[in-house]
Image (cartoon, rainbow, N blue to C red):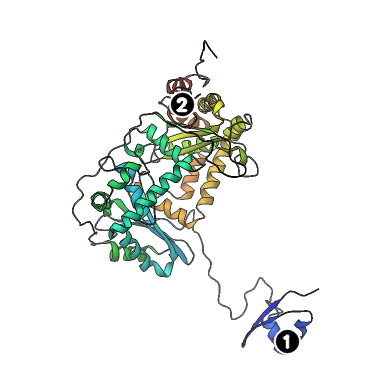
Amino acid sequence: MVAAAVSITGAAGAAVLRGPGVWGRSRMRFGLTASRRFSSGSAYPNIPLSSPLPGVPKPVFATVDGQEKFETKVTTLENGLRVASQNKFGQFCTVGILINSGSRHEAKYVGGIAHFLEKLAFSVSIWDTTMYAVSANTKGLDTVVGLLADVVLQPKLSDEEIDMTRMAVQFELEDLNMRPDPEPLLTEMIHEAAYRGNTVGLHRFCPAENIPRIDRKVLHSYLRNYYTPDRMVLAGVGIEHEQLVECARKYLLGINPVWSSEQAKDVDRSVAQYTGGIVKIERDMSDVSLGPTPIPELTHIMIGLESCSFLEEDFIPFAVLNMMMGGGGSFSAGGPGKGMFTRLYLNVLNRHHWMYNATSYHHSYEDTGLLCIHASADPRQVREMVEIITREFILMGGAVGEVELERAKTQLMSMLMMNLESRPVIFEDVGRQVLATNSRKLPHELCALIRDVKSDDIKRVATKMLRGKPSVAALGDLTDLPTYEHIQAALASKDGRLPRMYRLFR
């Protein structure tokens, strides 16, 4: 048997020792005292572990006073830019700029500008917010803020960059239509159906026909209106607030952007108008998954109803309702934390083995919200799948068990706190809340609101939601898809059943 390698570092460097019996020779070489130097307690044999060691500096530990020591600090600069910070121990920080800008503001522009800007820089773009963020050592804060200022206010937008971006956007569109996971495309479709032609219903992804139409002039026109200091938040997590404010003044105050500092002239302040409706894409989904065991051909349906904005009090009950519905894919049904006791698992996936997916989603914005269920099944079972989903919507307005409610609330609080263990997630939470409200609700405040949700609150918000028109997105073989009117009738009925169809010929 060969002994494991042992590494000992002395004054002269490192000696790697191998083989049996070597430890004895090392003691002769380094001496007994040398081996004791690396022992944790032999130098102080009579001092108990509960007492401090003599000559060792007293350790300083992080402490928390009251519910939350590290409140979010916000400072507004002279130009309207808000600086928000959340202190957090550690040598790394996450800093970024969030902008009240996105595809929802493109009604008067060529659609797809936000998608282009996402590809031109390291940003995340959704319908209503654009974000630029960096995680780095806190010692590099000055450099990081300077870099962010350059990216946001001084982008070169050269012809070569724009041509490369056109290629990247074209590739992403092709990938979007070929990928086996349809969720990004369905999410785009359900928003288009729910908010036809306005705000968050505008295309998040650049339409193929608009790719050659977006150039530097178009981009500068958009940036001039929406990349203004009063629509921005510089947020940081893991740094001192005063230091971040100082960097903001240095790099983001009095700086002329590359598109000139003219006053914004044409800012779209439209409020989301929920319309409801249906968007369908008929497509052969039999060959989207290549490989030795391809996924069977599936038809994907997403049905949604208007909920509320994240600024309303009912946002928390809707979040609990979404958690209570839960769901997922049929292949993920197992193991702790998989939502095995949510309604879509118990009532749908566990009872109807032929359904490949049933998942609830809640999208919430500053002026609206959308609660929807995505389901997937064989094209021949589309009608039955739709009826199962409409029935689950109707059941939302019924009785809510105390056990399932407490489980959903506990799971929501757990997910909230676990996500906020991540510094980038805290950064996004700080930035988005300050961008929308100029302040931030702390985690313990949100948990208190979640605990206060009662079964009557769930029933009330669900009943109100069910009075609205549905939004439907359908992708795949839609031969047996019920009409929009039949889906609407099912959601207005007492049991969620589709109207019966009578055929003379079969």
Q: Which residue is mark 1?
A: 32
- Relative image position of residue 277 (x, y in whole percent): 39, 28
2 and 1 marks in contact (CB < 8 Å): no
The picture quadrant where one finds residue 276 is: top left
For the residues labelled 2 and 1, the Cα–Cα distance comes to: 79 Å
- Res 463 label: 2
- Relative image position of residue 9 (x, y in whole percent): 64, 82
Q: Secondary structure at mark 2?
A: helix
Locate the N terminus by quadrant. bottom right
- Res 74 label: none
Is the residue marked by circle 2 packed among few (<14), some (14-19), or many (20+) residues within 10 Å? Answer: some
Of the numbered discs 2 and 1, the one sitting upstream in the chain is: 1
The amino acid at mark 2 is Thr
Q: Secondary structure at mark 1?
A: helix
- Relative image position of residue 173 (x, y in whole percent): 41, 45
Locate the C terminus by quadrant. top right
- Relative image position of residue 294 (x, y in whole percent): 59, 41
**Residue drawn at 36 percent across, 68 percent down:** 143
The amino acid at mark 1 is Leu
